[in-house]
């Protein structure tokens, strides 16, 4: 059996039990604690405290159809104490930014069939009064949920500049030259700022103008079963194309699928005790700008395509970024860098990553991006994310 499925079978209960990672009903498994890795107790706390609520647990307070206005419905439900705003199948054009509110769950009737088509435009924020344009924003909020729908940037009629085939040749235009076909697509899809106990579950975030998804100074968010694919702005110094974990802590990323953007980035002070579990990345996992360390990546498949500009794990550049923090660990992942098995895509260090070893992200520039953790044996319980079901 593939190694990245082994963790899934140990972390998720038997098929007869419906609970999954990110749901309620889990606690730290003290029997599998390994004192060489003291952060295990903190990693067990990642995600929504108490878990994402079952979809049957929150009443539907408003049902909207294409053509209905989202913001008044969200405001009414929030003022009434919270609940679900249910969007039927169909296309919802988004022409104004939408503010998500505490206690409100935005849920689609069909993940593929309920489409929020973002039609906003905005120039690069340096030319826009210093303001970034965001289609859906949650700020200083709690218990915000986004579930079972598609968000897609649809303000232009041409596709993002990237490649469909993993083995396509590298070219500097994708990540290192600005988008000139339209200079007003600097619109991010979904950004959480200073939020807590919120989640995005079972959604598609497609063809973002700038960032598809970002968490800024958040705590205890769960991002689960989402597909993130493509961004128009992903070039150097253009502040786009990130699945960004910016100064956020105790967040859980489970079964995420991420492709054709710039980075999945764990970065900035305050970024600590995040868990990235059983995800599939076709972009690099990047640590930089002085994250606080102690983040975990386990059971993932990370394989950057040949046309991507970075190997599977990055740490930024000393000319532009601060160094990563200490204690960022990788365990039991499948790693492939630009078509070459392992953390490195060229040179003598280009070798397959061991699945029985723990790797630590370097915390100094000028060294390899990762190095073997100073131990010769894997975690005692076979995982660094040790949970058990509460009886």
Image: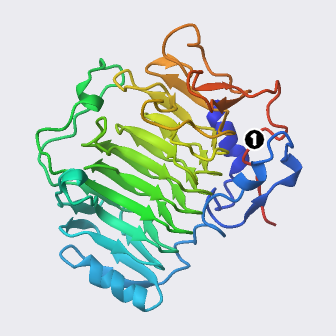
272 left or right of 153?
right
> Looking at the image, which residue sits at the far bottom?
80
Image quarter in which the N terminus is found: top right
Residue lying at the far top of the rendered structure:
348
Front residue of 269/88: it is 269
Query: x, y (%) of residue 176?
Result: 27, 29
Residue located 83% across and 41% down the image: 381
Asked if one can make out residue 13 in the rendered structure from this viewpoint, the answer is no
The picture quadrant where one finds residue 290 is: top right
Q: Position of residue 136 (x, y in %)?
A: 33, 65
Compared to residue 198, the image places residue 121 above or below, namely above
Front residue of 246 and 313: 246
- Give the percent coordinates (x, y) of residue 61: 40, 86
Q: Please state the total of marks drawn on the protein image.
A: 1
* Quadrant (top left/top right/bottom left/bottom right) for the C terminus: bottom right
> Residue 92 appears in which quarter of the rendering?
bottom left
The crowding category of the residue bearing disc 1, from other C-alpha atoms within 10 Å (few below 14, some 14 to 19, many at least 20), is: many
Left or right for 390, reference 295: right
Q: Is residue 358 visible?
A: yes
Height in image: 47 above or below 253?
below
Secondary structure of residue under mark 1 = loop
> Tell me, what colour scheme is on the image?
rainbow
Q: Residue sitting at 57 percent across and 51 percent down?
A: 271
Residue shown at 28% from the left, 50% from the top: 208
Per the image, the residue denoted by label 1 is 383
Please, is residue 118 above or below residue 59 in the view?
above
Q: Position of residue 313 (x, y in %)?
A: 52, 30
373 left or right, relative to 265: right
Q: In the displayed image of the protein, which residue is found farthest to the front?
A: 319
Q: Residue at x 35, y 39 (%)?
A: 261
């Amino acid at each position: 059996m593939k190694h990245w499925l082994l963790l899934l079978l140990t972390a998720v209960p038997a098929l007869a039990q419906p609970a999954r990672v990110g749901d309620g009903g889990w606690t730290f498994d003290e029997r599998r604690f390994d004192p060489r890795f003291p952060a295990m107790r903190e990693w067990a706390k990642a995600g929504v405290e108490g878990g994402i609520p079952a979809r049957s647990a929150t009443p539907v307070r408003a049902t909207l159809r294409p053509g209905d206005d989202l913001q008044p419905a969200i405001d009414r439900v929030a003022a009434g104490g919270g609940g679900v705003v249910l969007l039927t199948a169909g296309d919802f054009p988004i022409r104004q930014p939408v503010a998500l509110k505490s206690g409100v769950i935005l849920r689609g009737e069909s993940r593929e069939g309920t489409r929020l088509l973002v039609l906003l435009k905005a120039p690069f924020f340096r030319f826009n009064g210093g303001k970034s344009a965001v289609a859906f924003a949650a700020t200083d909020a709690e218990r915000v949920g986004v579930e079972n729908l598609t968000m897609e940037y649809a303000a232009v009629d041409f596709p993002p500049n990237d490649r469909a085939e993993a083995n396509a040749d590298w070219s500097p235009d994708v990540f290192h030259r600005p988008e000139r076909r339209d200079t007003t697509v600097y619109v991010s899809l979904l950004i959480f700022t200073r939020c807590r106990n919120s989640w995005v579950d079972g959604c598609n975030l497609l063809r973002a103008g700038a960032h598809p998804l970002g968490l800024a100074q958040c705590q205890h968010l769960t991002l689960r079963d989402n597909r993130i694919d493509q961004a128009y702005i992903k070039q150097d110094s253009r502040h786009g194309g990130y699945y960004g974990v910016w100064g956020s802590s105790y967040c859980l990323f489970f079964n995420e699928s991420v492709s054709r953007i710039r980075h999945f980035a764990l970065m900035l002070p305050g970024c600590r005790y995040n868990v990235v579990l059983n995800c599939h990345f076709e972009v690099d996992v990047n640590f930089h700008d002085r994250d606080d360390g102690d983040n975990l990546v386990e059971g993932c498949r990370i394989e950057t395509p040949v046309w991507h500009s970075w190997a599977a794990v990055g740490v930024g550049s000393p000319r532009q970024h601060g160094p990563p923090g200490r204690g960022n660990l990788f365990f039991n992942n499948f790693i492939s860098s630009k078509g070459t098995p392992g953390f490195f895509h060229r040179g003598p260090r280009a070798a397959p990553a061991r699945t029985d070893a723990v790797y630590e992200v370097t915390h100094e520039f000028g060294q390899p991006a990762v190095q073997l953790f100073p131990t010769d044996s894997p975690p005692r319980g076979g995982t660094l994310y040790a949970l058990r079901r509460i009886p």
